[in-house]
Image (cartoon, rainbow, N blue to C red):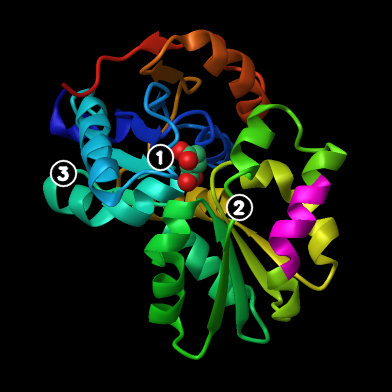
Amino acid sequence: MLSKDINRRPIGVFDSGIGGLTVLRDIAATLPNEDTIYLGDTARVPYGSKSRETIIRYAREVAYFLVARQIKLLVVACNTASAFALDELRSTLDVPVIGVIEPGARAAVRATKTGRVGVIGTEGTIRSSAYCKAIKALNPAITTFTQACPLFVPLVEEGWAGDEVTAVIAARYLSGLKTHDIDTLVLGCTHYPLLKDTIASVMGPDVRLIDSAEATAEEVLRVLSANGLANPGGKSASHAFFVTDSPERFLTVGSRFFGPGLEKAALAAVGA
Ligand code: DGL
């Protein structure tokens, strides 16, 4: 492909599994001219409970798979992978790399009036303090409070986002944050946008929820435009899906995350 055609190349999006489809859905809605290639590392999910070293290794392997497919930009849709592997990917890849943490942190800093911000995510994301560091870097006067909510991921994948069991678990996880009088809460995990209603009813109307997926799609739009990489369009965008384990579950559960348009996924050979 000639270099003048770079803007017609696809955007690569990766996640530990299915959840990153929430980010892809927002990218597809915000950038309707852009082709995408999504890779869900379904054979090795979850990343949220794994060590930093393992996540960096996985992220590197998955990123190489996408870069070999001539992507023009890489989106790390997984919060845990963004928290641990973003610097490594940025320093080794020759395409722009966008994670979900910085856009989510920026949106939270813009939203808070009281300077008291909560962050929820996987154990790994919370342990990394990546959101807190990103928020503090933007505004050191903001105080952050965190809570890992590891059961949210399997509950969403089970299709229980609106179930009373999930409401009880959410009330338990979020009870500590409620005592801290936060006015903004970052949904720091790919699956949490599907729990917005449940989380909003626990936190109450005075707490603004920040969806990192939405904020990331806006950031992709900004970076493509700033670098002259936006696809001028002319044909309808295509979305290709790859997984590292058998596609059946990805297709069934994934349509809850992505909506219509997720019909087939191919097996990707990633890693050793
Ligand atoms: N995609 C992960 C994240 O956003 C959640 C699922 C996992 O633990 O792999 O952190």
Res. 47 mark: 1
The answer to whether the residue bearing label 1 lies less than 8 angstroms from the nearest atom of ligand 1 is yes
Q: Is residue 180 above or below residue 51?
A: below
Residue 158 is a magenta residue:
no
Local SS, label 1: loop
Q: Is residue 268 above or below residue 232?
A: above
For this view, does 130 lie left or right of residue 160? left
Residue 172 is a magenta residue:
yes
Kindly identify the amino acid type of the residue bearing the numbered disc 3: Leu
* Number of other residues with Cα within 10 Å of mark 3, as a class: few under 14, some 14 to 19, many 20 or more: some
**Which circle, 3 or 1, is nearer the viewer?**
1
* Number of other residues with Cα within 10 Å of mark 1, as a class: few under 14, some 14 to 19, many 20 or more: many
Q: Residue, x 87% and y 41% (percent of image)?
A: 164
Kindly identify the amino acid type of the residue bearing the numbered disc 2: Cys
Q: Position of residue 179 (x, y in %)?
A: 74, 78
Res. 149 mark: 2
Q: Nearer the viewer, residue 213 or 232?
A: 213
Q: Give the residue number, with chain letter if any, for mark 3.
A: 93
Predominant secondary structure, magenta span: helix
Q: Residue, x 31% and y 29% (percent of image)?
A: 8
